Image: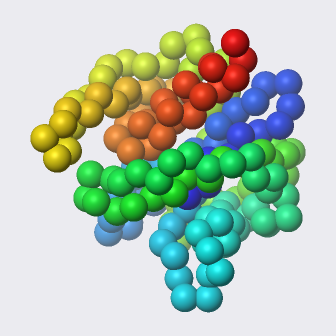
Amino acid sequence: MLVLISRGDNPSILFTKRAAHLRHHPGEVCFPGGMWEPGDDNLLVTAQREVHEEIGLPAGHIQLLGALPQSHTRAGTAVTPFVAHFDASINLQPSPDELESIFMVPLAAFQAGLQVREDHFERHGHILRVPVYHYQGYEIWGFTAAVTAQLLRLVDRALR
């Protein structure tokens, strides 16, 4: 997956909402991305391909900042979250085959307090505490919220 942060005076994280007609995770908020396919040289290429397919952002408009540690969804799927900058002035279009919408949440909004609760999940005998965020009618929870919280901690440390 690719966690995209817009460049500029009001940096924001890009999220997508999956289409309601999808069989897996319909209507859920997530980051653009998808599964590796034969022909993808590596997972970054996979993420860039999926971003282009889902929101129309070409790889040439993405500046890689790094990657967060690989982690697993509750279903056990291994995910490598790449983090990148992009120019928010580029016109993005959600693929109607995959997405209902694209939306951006300013980093400042997270810092002001978007968390509404904390969900608890058990994984391999450990309890995971994951924040849940609400922003303009969207609910960011589960794996997406966990990756978001991890990124926000890194940003907070970098700004200190």
Kindly identify the residue that appears in the image at 65 percent across and 66 percent down: 44
Q: Quadrant of residue 129 in the image?
A: top left
How does the figure colour the protein chain or chains?
rainbow
Q: Is residue 16 visible?
A: no
Instruction: Indicate the position of residue 146 as horizontal and vertical percent values.
Output: 42, 37
| Residue 128 left/right relative to 63 | left
- Residue located farthest toward the bottom when viewing the structure as drawn: 39
Kindly identify the residue that appears in the image at 55 percent across and 88 percent down: 38
Q: Quadrant of residue 144 in the image?
A: top left
Kindly identify the residue that appears in the image at 48 percent across and 72 percent down: 35
Q: Is residue 77 visible?
A: yes
Relative to residue 119, is residue 16 depicted above or below?
Answer: below
Instruction: Indicate the position of residue 85 as horizontal and vertical percent values.
Output: 77, 45
Q: Quadrant of the C terminus?
A: top right
Q: Nearer the viewer, residue 57 or 35?
A: 35
Q: Quadrant of the N terminus?
A: bottom right
Kindly identify the residue that appears in the image at 79 percent across and 25 percent down: 10
| Residue 93 left/right relative to 39 | right
Q: Quadrant of residue 88 in the image?
A: top right
Instruction: Indicate the position of residue 8 as horizontal and vertical percent values.
Output: 86, 31
Instruction: Indicate the position of residue 114 as horizontal and vertical percent values.
Output: 49, 19
| Residue 143 left/right relative to 119 | right
Q: Nearer the viewer, residue 101 or 32?
A: 32
Relative to residue 92, is residue 148 depicted above or below?
Answer: above
Relative to residue 38, is residue 72 depicted above or below?
Answer: above
Q: Nearer the viewer, residue 67 or 129?
A: 67
How many numbered tags mark residues here?
0
